Image (cartoon, rainbow, N blue to C red):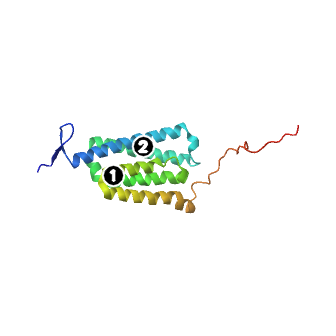
């Protein structure tokens, strides 16, 4: 039995290594596009950030750099991506937890990073990687949004710096 398979384009490919390489390339491009769009979104609307804006910018800039390095490695030496194993998904999950921790916790606009991690898990390694990624994502999400803020109050209470509007209160004028 031959180890070669045929694609829809009738090109021979080694079903295991070539398929995994293609998956990692697609995920690396998706990761860098998602990271750049997120960084662009917070540059356009910085009001959505917590008082820890500099930490958020630093984390997102580091993730954009990490994502760009992964794209370059996927093009130049894809075998290193395959040898990385679970290192890349682990960095993705840790980044998602860190960005949730320094922003608004459960109401953070960066929740999409957890969704990206969960969507990227199945094509990467099947059932085991998907379950491991899902469990670690849930544990780190709960830790970053519920437990860590109790011990490390990096995120101040959600208070707006703007004065509250009193438009709902009746105004009585006796003039």
Mark 1, secondary structure of its residue: helix
Query: Could you tell me if the residues under marks 2 and 1 are in contact, i.e. CB atoms within 8 Å?
Result: no
Left or right of 1 on screen, residue 46? right
Q: Nearer the viewer, residue 50 or 132?
A: 132
Residue 64's label in the rendered image is: 2
Q: Residue furthest left?
A: 1
Seen in the picture, residue 16 relative to 132 is either above or below; the reply is above
Left or right of 171 on screen, residue 136? left
Provide residue 29's location: percent of width, then percent of height. 35, 41
Seen in the picture, residue 34 relative to 93 is either above or below; the reply is above
Sequence-first tag of 2 and 1: 2
Seen in the picture, residue 102 relative to 76 is either above or below; the reply is below
Judge the density around disc 2: few (<14), some (14-19), many (≥20) Cα neighbours within 10 Å: many
Provide residue 71's location: percent of width, then percent of height. 34, 42
Quadrant showing the C terminus: top right
Name the residue tied to disc 1.
Answer: 122
Q: Nearer the viewer, mark 2 or mark 1?
A: 1
Q: Nearer the viewer, residue 14 or 60?
A: 14
Left or right of 154 on screen, residue 116? left
Judge the density around disc 1: few (<14), some (14-19), many (≥20) Cα neighbours within 10 Å: some
Mark 2, secondary structure of its residue: helix
Q: Nearer the viewer, residue 116 or 157?
A: 116
Q: Nearer the viewer, residue 120 or 46?
A: 120
Provide residue 80's location: percent of width, then percent of height. 27, 49
Provide residue 113's location: percent of width, then percent of height. 44, 48
What residue is drawn where x is 20% and y is 47%? Answer: 15
What residue is drawn where x is 78% and y is 43%? Answer: 170
What residue is drawn where x is 57% and y is 54%? Answer: 155
Number of callouts: 2
Cα separation between marks 2 and 1: 23 Å
């Amino acid at each position: 039995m031959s180890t070669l398979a045929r694609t829809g384009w009738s090109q021979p490919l080694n079903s295991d290594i070539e398929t995994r390489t293609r998956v990692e390339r697609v995920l690396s491009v998706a990761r860098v596009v998602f990271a750049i769009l997120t960084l662009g979104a917070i540059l356009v609307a910085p009001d959505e950030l917590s008082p820890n804006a500099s930490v958020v910018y630093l984390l997102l800039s580091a993730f954009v750099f990490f994502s760009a390095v992964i794209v370059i490695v996927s093009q130049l030496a894809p075998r290193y991506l395959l040898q990385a194993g679970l290192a890349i998904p682990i960095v993705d999950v840790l980044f998602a937890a860190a960005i949730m921790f320094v922003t608004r916790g459960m109401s953070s606009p960066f929740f999409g990073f957890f969704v990206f991690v969960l969507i990227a898990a199945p094509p990467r390694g099947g059932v085991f990687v998907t379950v491991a990624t899902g469990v670690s994502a849930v544990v780190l999400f709960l830790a970053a949004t519920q437990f860590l803020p109790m011990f490390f109050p990096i995120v101040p209470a959600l208070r707006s710096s703007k004065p509250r509007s009193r438009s709902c209160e009746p105004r009585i004028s006796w003039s």
